[in-house]
Image (spheres, helix red, strand yellow):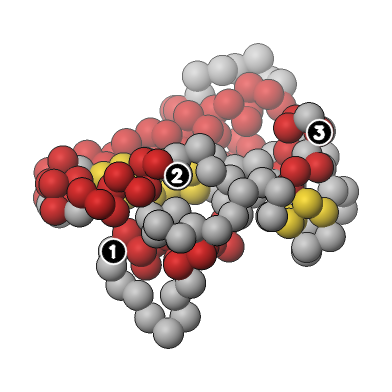
């Protein structure tokens, strides 16, 4: 249940609906991320921070794989880069910013993080890296639901 995802003292919406419970869980995640950000800025010389959800949500059916609801694959991503990071990586930041509206799937995050950290390996694929000049995907090329559905077929994109 959504109510198990936040402490009682963090309830903001209290009308008992699933929408309110979900909104409280999202607010709690936001607060948690803010605390991480504040701590990292003050204590860790934060250069970049990436947050993305592992799945979307349908408030009526949840997030299990039983139905192929595109709401379950629409995920938020937030990429923060510090002024120092942008100064030290101007080309990379410019490319990342250029790709800010591109579509991606969360299985590409390994390559995006490797690219942002300049930590490339034998497993790195620049075609899946939003910070690479040769990022190679758009909504017409991407699949979801075990490569059975194209992202472009999402009714919200029609």
Which tag is nearer the camera, tag 2 or tag 3? 2
> Quick one: which residue is furthest to the top in this view?
15
- Going by the image, does 50 lie left or right of 94? right
Q: Is the N terminus in the top left, top right, bottom left or bottom right quadrant?
A: top right
* Residue 31 can be seen in this image: yes
Task: Give the residue drawn at x 28%, y 48%.
Answer: 93
Measuring from the top left, give residue 47's x and y in whole percent.
20, 51
Measuring from the top left, give residue 26's x and y in whole percent.
53, 33
Which tag is nearer the camera, tag 2 or tag 1? 2
> Quick one: which residue is furthest to the bottom in this view?
122
Q: Residues under labels 2 and 1: Cα distance?
A: 17 Å
Q: Please tell me whether mark 3 sits on a helix, a strand or a loop.
A: helix
- Going by the image, does 34 lie left or right of 108? left
* Residue bearing mark 2: 99
Measuring from the top left, give residue 108's x and y in whole percent.
53, 62
Q: Nearer the viewer, residue 38 or 97?
A: 97
Q: Nearer the viewer, residue 54 or 153?
A: 153
């Amino acid at each position: 249940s959504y109510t198990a995802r936040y402490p009682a003292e963090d309830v903001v919406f209290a009308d008992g609906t699933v929408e309110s419970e979900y909104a409280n869980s999202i607010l709690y995640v936001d607060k948690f991320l803010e605390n991480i950000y504040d701590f990292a800025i003050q204590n860790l010389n934060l250069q970049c921070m990436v947050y993305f959800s592992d799945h979307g949500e349908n408030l009526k059916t949840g997030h299990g794989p039983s139905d192929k609801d595109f709401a379950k694959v629409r995920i938020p991503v937030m990429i923060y880069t510090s002024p120092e990071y942008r100064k030290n990586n101007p080309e990379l930041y410019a490319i990342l910013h250029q790709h800010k509206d591109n579509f991606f799937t969360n299985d590409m995050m390994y390559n995006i993080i490797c690219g942002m950290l300049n930590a490339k390996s034998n497993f790195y694929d620049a075609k899946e890296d939003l910070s690479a000049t040769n990022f190679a995907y758009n909504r017409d090329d991407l699949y979801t639901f075990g490569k059975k559905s194209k992202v472009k077929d999402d009714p919200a994109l029609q």
